[in-house]
Structures are given as structure tokens and as C-alpha cells.
Image: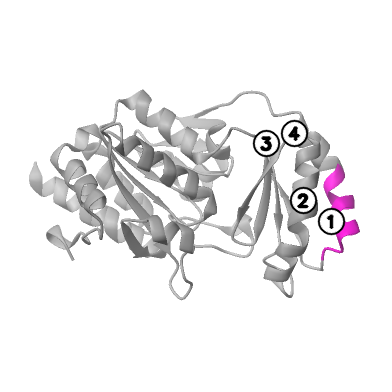
Amino acid sequence: MGLQGIATPTTDAGRAGLEAVLASPRDAVVALDFDGTLAPIVADPSRARAHPGVVGALRRLAPRVGAIVVVTGRPAGLAVEYGGFAGVDGLVVLGHYGAERWESGAVTAPPVHPGVAGARAGVDAVLAAAGAPEGTWVEDKGRSLAVHTRRAGRPEEAFELLRAPVEALAAGHGLVVEPGRLVLELRPPGVDKGAALTGFLRERGARSVLYAGDDLGDVAAFAAVERLRGEGVAGLLVCSGAVGDAPVKELADRADLVVEGPAGVVGLLDALGAELSRAR
């Protein structure tokens, strides 16, 4: 363990990122994924809720840093509801990989990409033609579609079976596929967590950032932080690995720090808030 209970990052860049956040917290942004990072992964995404310690940790930390932002593939308003974030002053939620923004109780967003409607109309036929097994289901997020295989009898096999036909469907409507843990999400191109995070950090003039995520959708955000380090923005990359479930290897290999799922993220946020409180 590191400074007053904060785990020590395993890389020089990560240690520099943590030191920068602690040295000048008003110039720092704490950025967090939702599912798997603030909320445990569940079979039914509509039942996901933030870890019980999340809201308290965010409330204590928010007044001490430049900004806290949740970057998620979920609709922004839904993430606010499931996270209980409405009571966290100053929190911003970038939903649909940054296509939506919730701030001060209001959601702003551009028009929905026209390809989503076409994919929505064709997805059931594509899954049927591909032989999608029982338990496969489609989550309609409004601005994107997500094909889940977690409930299938052999979820990994179903995921691989459906990957190519789902990618073909997406391409036919000008969309791209973002793979995750037993989910294939069809969404507009050019919209990802890396672009969303970079835009937010530049908007806030951040000099340091802590980003925590758990899945392949967070790789773009990790890559963005790595690029921004070259521009002088210090960064700490945290991988949230669920207890009893190995974290996504690609993310864990690039992380400066791996913690034990949402409970570990809450512990890190609590320790950071406590340290910044003592430093006042």
C-alpha cells in the first residue's frame, strides 16, 4: 500500500499521475466507467446499480478535485438513475460514449445516427439466420444496440458465432461494433470513450487525470490518457477487476493499478478523498 492507504501504482507514469493528482487536485479530473467499475456486472443490465459506497465516496471527493466525470456506454440519464448520481454536486455523465451529456439535471445530445433505426429493424433476422442460441437478446439503448450472449448456455461460443454477422449488419448501416464482456454493441463511428474523455479534459484544462475502467470499451480511454501524457497531462490508469473474475487482460496489462472490482474502486476513491482532506 502507498500513501495513507492508497495503493502504489506499479509504473513510473502511474506514480507520477497519482502524485500530480495529490499535489494539485483542483487541476485534476477523476473519470470513471460505470458497469464493472462503479456497478457490479449483472446478467440483466437493467438491474445494475452502483456499489453502495459509490455515492458517498463521490460526494466526499467532488469538492476536492477539479471535476468528476462518469464515461459510459449507457444512456446518460439511465446511468444517473442507476448510479444515484443526482445528489453528487458538480458530477458530469458522458453517456453513449460521449454522444450524450448529463449535467446539472439536464441531458443534451445531437440527433440519433440514422443507421441505428436500420440496424434495429434488421437485427432479429440477422440473429435468427446466424443461429443465435436461446438466451441471446438485444438491448435497445436508443442511440445504439447491444447484442448480449451472457444468458446463453455457452455464452463465449455464442459471442464468437454472432460476431461476424453482427459486424456485417453494423457496417451495412454505417455503424461499428464495440465488443465487450459477452456483448457486441452497434454504435455510430467516431464515438468512443477516448474521444469523450479527451474533449472533457481539454474543456476543463486538466493537468492530471485518474481513469478507471474494466472492459474493452475502456481501451480507447486508456489510449487517450497515454497520448495525453505525451502532451504533459499526468495520468493514472486503473483497471477494475471483479472479485473471482480475472480483469480484461488487454486493460490490465496497460493499467498502472489493478483493484478488486467496484469495491476496490470505492476503496481507492475513499482513500484519495481522505488524503486530500488531510492535505487541506
The spot of residue 49 in percent (x, y) is 51, 56
Query: Upstream in the sequence, badge 2 or badge 3?
Result: 3
Is the C-beta separation of discs 1 and 2 under 8 Å?
A: yes
The alpha-carbon separation of the residues under discs 1 and 4 comes to 18 Å
Is the C-beta separation of discs 3 and 1 under 8 Å?
A: no
Q: Which residue is mark 1?
A: 127
- Frontmost of labels 1 and 4 is 4
The alpha-carbon separation of the residues under discs 2 and 4 comes to 12 Å
Which is the main secondary structure of the residues drawn in magenta? helix
Is the C-beta separation of discs 2 and 3 under 8 Å?
A: no
Q: Residue type at mark 3?
A: Arg
Residue at image x 67%, y 36%? 143
Is the C-beta separation of discs 4 and 3 under 8 Å?
A: no
Q: Which residue is mark 4?
A: 174
Q: Which residues are magenta?
A: 122-132
* For residue 193, side relative to residue 237 (left or right): right
Q: Residue type at mark 4?
A: Gly
Q: Which residue is mark 3?
A: 143
The spot of residue 171 in percent (x, y) is 76, 40
